Image: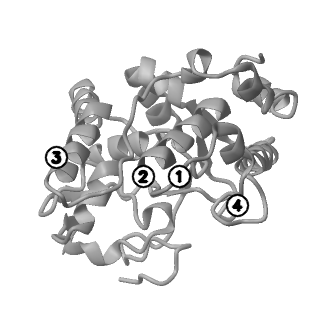
Amino acid sequence: MNTDDMSKPGWEEFPAYNAEIISPQLPCGAGWLGNCLLELGVSLWQPWDKPTNPMWRHLGNFQYRYKDRSDRISTWRQTLPALKAGRVFTFSPNLVPKISHRRKRALPGEHRTILFVRDPRDALYSEWKRQCINAEGFNLSFEQFAKGPFLNQPYSYLQYLKQFLQDWREELANTSHLILRFEDYRTAPEGTLSSALDYFSLHRSTNQIADALRASDFHIGKAIETARRESGKLRTQLYRAGIPLEYKHSFTPDMLALFSPDFDSLFEWLGYEII
């Protein structure tokens, strides 16, 4: 087991990644897809470039037990409810995706890539609401937040998201890729997951897909988070409303003006309404 090189899964049975799942470092629902894949026997080694391999025990023949029993489990189960301490997974050797927030392709050569996005207006609005809840003393307006530094970087949240999407539009041009959207996952989860499975050539039964969808439902993760918060073992709240296109009934004209015209071509590329 190797925990230092994030460019590789770190296991002898899994010498390399062969696909990517990309999303911006903002609330967009990519964890839902990741959890569905775990439930369907697809590994997610070092998710979002976090060194999680020590939390696994190799049992042989592509079987692995998730063995972490510390309070870190609460954080991971918020995002990936499948990761229950002691659970044994049998992973497919054929599909080994790297899930990350990277701004450039991490793997060499041709490979399949899913870009999981959310309407930029909602992605930033949801992150702002998260920080209103979680960050002590946070009192910025949405406009101040959006124009403020992204994670202490020399660029704003707006600039980060615009550049991230522009970078991936260029990266994905003339290459194999699939764009999945938060809005479709929330309104048509079965169809959204089926699109991902078809793209990855991953064949599972109707019952297996239904079970994965039930185990990955928004309310499962939210219930885990609520229980951990009420027990005092967790402080951070990730789940909130989970409403598609929330901006349509939450934004003022000034908030909308932050995105137009700079994001218009990106809205068009991703199939979102230009207002």
Query: Left of 110 or right of it: where is 249?
Result: left
Q: How far across and how far down the image is residue 165, in percent?
A: 74, 43
Q: Which residue is mark 1?
A: 138
Q: Are marks 1 and 3 in contact (CB under 8 Å)?
A: no
Q: Quadrant of residue 100?
A: bottom right
Query: How far is mark 4 from mark 3, CA to CA?
Result: 44 Å
Q: Disc 4 vs disc 3: which is toward the camera?
A: 3
Q: How far across and how far down the image is residue 197, in percent?
A: 44, 35
Badge 2 amino acid:
Asn
Query: Left of 10 or right of it: where is 230?
Result: left
**Residue at image x 72%, y 28%?**
255
Badge 1 amino acid:
Phe
Question: In this view of the protein, can residue 41 be seen by the observer?
Answer: no
Q: Which residue is mark 3?
A: 227
Q: Quadrant of residue 269?
A: top right
Q: Which badge, 1 or 4, is on the more N-terminal residue?
A: 4
Query: How far is mark 1 from mark 3, CA to CA?
Result: 25 Å
